[in-house]
C-alpha cells in the first residue's frame, strides 16, 4: 500500500481501523473548529469520543442533534466514495499527516473554537510530507496592483529556493500566490473551506483543478461540503499550523487574512508582514498589525527565507545605498574636500585656514584627493574635479 492510498500506511490492526472510522464519522458530522470535540479526542481517543457523543444529552438539544448526525454517517461508505474520486483521508500518525496540526489543541479559544481536526481529506498526487518546511502566503481578496506585484516577487523567491507555498485558493492574493508559484515551477497547495471535490470560488476553477490533478488540495471538510463563513475561519487555523510561517501581503482592518496571522502568532510561528501605502485600505490591517508590534516587516522573498530557514542558511547582507566616491575617504580627507572650491581655485594656505588644519596636513590630504580623482591642481590653485 503506497503513502497516497486512501488509508496511508501507519499503525495497523483493528484499533487503528476503528480509530480511522471514528475520525471519518466525526469529520462528517462535527463542524470544523469544534474545540470541545478536539479536546475530547485528545483525552480519550476518537473511538471513545464518538461513543460518548452518540449518547450525550443536553438541555438545549444540541448534543442530541449532533448524535443524530453522527449516527447517520456510514464511514466505510464515505471512504469508498472518496476513493472513487481520488480522495484520501489522513489521520494523525499517518506518514503524510502535517505534524504542525497537532499544536492546534494548545490554542483553543475561550469560546471553544479551534483544535486539531479529526482528519484531513486530500485530493492530488502530492505527498503532504513536502510541506514540512512550507510558507503560507495570504492576503486580501481585493488585491491591489501593489499587492499582486509583491506577492509575485515573494512567491517567485520561495519557489526558486524550493520552499512550498500554502494558501487558501481564494480570489486576490491567494490566487496570485498559487499562480506565481506555479509560474516559477514551484510547489503549492490550497487549503479549502469546502469539500475537495468542489470548486470555490468558481473563478478559480482552472487553478483548483490543476492543483487537484498535479499537486494537492486539502480540507478538514468531507467531500460535498459547502463553504460557510465559520468554515473559512476554521480553515485559516490549518494554514497557519501546517506551515513554518505566514506572510501577510495585504489585509484590510476586517480581513480573514488577519485571522490567519493571528493563528500563526498564537502557534509561535513566524508572522511576516509586507507593509503597504498608508493611503491604501487594503493595507490598513497589515500596517496596524505592525504598529501594534506584532509581526516582522518583509519586503522580499529573500527576507522571508532568512526568517524561516535554518540558522545561517539564507543570510542577507544589510541593504546599502549606492557607493559614492567620497565613501572611502579618511576623516581628514573629508574635512579638507568640503573646503575645496568648485569654480574659483584656492591656494593650499587658504584651504588650510578654512578647514582648520595645518598647511602640511592640508597639502598631504589634497594630494591624496587628487590621486583619487576628487580634486585637481592648476596654475591658480586647487578646485574640485568635475566627477566629485
Image (cartoon, rainbow, N blue to C red):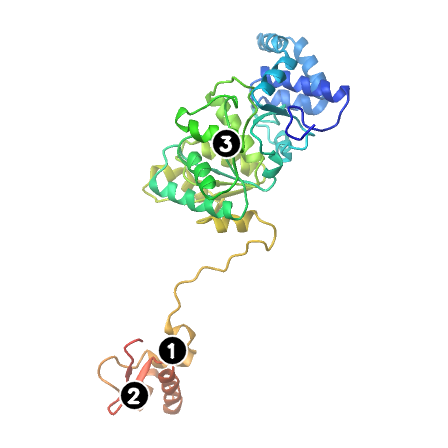
Callout 3 secondary element: helix
Which quadrant of the view contains residue 356?
A: bottom left
Q: Which mark is residue 334?
A: 1
Confirm or deny contact between disc 3 and disc 2 (CB under 8 A): no
Q: Is residue 244 left or right of residue 155?
A: right
Q: Are the residues tagged 1 and 2 within 8 Å (C-beta)?
A: no
Q: Is residue 236 visible?
A: no
How many discs mark residues in the rendered view? 3
In three-dimensional space, the C-alpha distance between marks 1 and 2, rounded to whole angstroms, equals 18 Å
The secondary element bearing badge 2 is classed as strand
Q: Which residue is mark 3?
A: 211
Q: Residue 109: percent from the left, percent from the top?
A: 57, 27
Identified at 61% across, 50% down, the residue is 310
Mark 3 and mark 1: Cα distance apart in space: 60 Å
Q: Dot 2 surroundings within 10 Å: few (below 14), some, or many (20 or more)?
A: some
Q: Considering depth in this image, is 214 or 232 the residue closer to the camera?
A: 214
Residue at 51% x, 18% y: name it: 225
Q: Nearer the viewer, mark 3 or mark 2?
A: 3
Query: Which tag, 3 or 1, sits closer to the chain's start?
Result: 3
Dot 3 crowding, Cα within 10 Å, few <14, some 14–19, many 20+: many
Image coordinates for residue 267, horizontal then vertical, percent: 58, 37
The one nearer the camera, 21 or 288, is 21
Image position of 66 with respect to 348: above or below = above
Q: Secondary structure at mark 1?
A: helix
Q: Which residue is mark 2?
A: 377
Q: Nearer the viewer, residue 143 or 157?
A: 157
Q: Quadrant of residue 80?
A: top right
Amino acid at each position: 500500500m503506497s503513502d497516497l492510498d486512501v488509508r496511508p500506511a501507519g499503525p495497523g490492526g483493528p484499533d487503528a481501523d476503528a480509530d480511522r472510522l471514528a475520525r471519518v464519522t466525526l469529520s462528517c458530522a462535527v463542524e470544523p473548529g469544534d474545540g470541545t470535540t478536539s479536546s475530547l479526542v485528545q483525552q480519550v481517543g476518537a473511538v471513545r469520543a464518538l461513543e460518548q457523543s452518540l449518547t450525550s444529552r443536553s438541555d438545549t438539544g444540541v448534543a442530541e442533534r449532533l448524535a443524530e448526525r453522527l449516527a447517520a454517517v456510514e464511514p466505510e461508505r464515505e471512504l469508498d466514495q472518496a476513493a472513487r474520486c481520488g480522495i484520501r483521508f489522513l489521520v494523525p500518525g499517518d506518514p503524510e499527516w502535517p505534524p504542525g496540526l497537532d499544536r492546534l489543541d494548545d490554542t483553543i479559544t475561550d469560546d471553544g473554537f479551534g483544535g486539531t481536526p479529526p482528519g484531513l481529506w486530500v485530493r492530488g498526487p502530492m505527498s503532504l510530507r513536502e510541506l514540512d518546511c512550507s510558507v503560507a502566503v495570504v492576503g486580501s481578496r481585493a488585491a491591489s496592483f501593489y499587492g499582486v506585484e509583491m506577492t509575485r516577487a515573494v512567491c517567485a523567491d520561495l519557489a526558486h529556493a524550493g520552499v512550498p507555498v500554502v494558501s487558501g485558493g481564494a480570489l486576490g492574493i491567494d490566487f496570485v500566490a498559487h499562480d506565481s508559484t506555479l509560474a516559477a515551477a514551484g510547489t503549492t497547495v490550497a487549503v479549502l473551506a469546502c469539500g475537495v471535490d468542489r470548486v470555490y470560488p468558481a473563478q478559480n476553477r482552472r487553478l483548483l483543478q490543476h492543483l487537484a490533478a498535479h499537486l494537492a488540495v486539502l480540507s478538514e471538510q468531507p467531500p460535498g461540503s459547502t463553504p460557510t463563513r465559520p468554515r473559512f475561519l476554521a480553515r485559516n487555523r490549518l494554514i497557519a499550523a501546517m506551515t513554518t510561517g505566514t506572510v501577510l501581503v495585504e489585509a484590510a482592518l476586517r480581513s480573514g487574512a488577519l485571522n490567519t496571522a493571528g493563528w500563526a502568532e498564537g502557534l509561535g510561528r513566524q508572522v511576516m508582514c509586507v507593509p503597504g501605502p498608508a493611503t491604501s485600505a487594503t493595507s490598513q490591517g497589515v500596517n496596524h498589525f505592525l504598529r501594534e508590534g506584532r509581526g516582522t516587516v518583509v519586503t522580499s522573498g529573500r527576507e522571508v527565507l532568512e526568517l524561516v530557514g535554518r540558522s545561517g542558511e539564507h543570510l542577507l547582507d544589510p541593504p546599502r545605498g549606492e557607493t559614492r566616491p567620497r565613501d572611502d575617504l579618511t576623516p581628514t580627507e573629508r574635512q579638507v574636500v568640503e573646503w575645496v572650491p568648485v569654480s574659483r581655485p584656492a591656494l593650499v594656505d587658504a584651504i588650510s585656514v578654512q578647514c582648520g588644519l595645518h598647511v602640511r596636513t592640508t597639502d598631504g590630504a589634497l594630494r591624496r584627493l587628487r590621486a583619487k580623482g576628487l580634486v585637481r591642481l592648476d596654475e591658480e590653485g586647487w578646485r574640485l574635479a568635475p566627477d566629485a
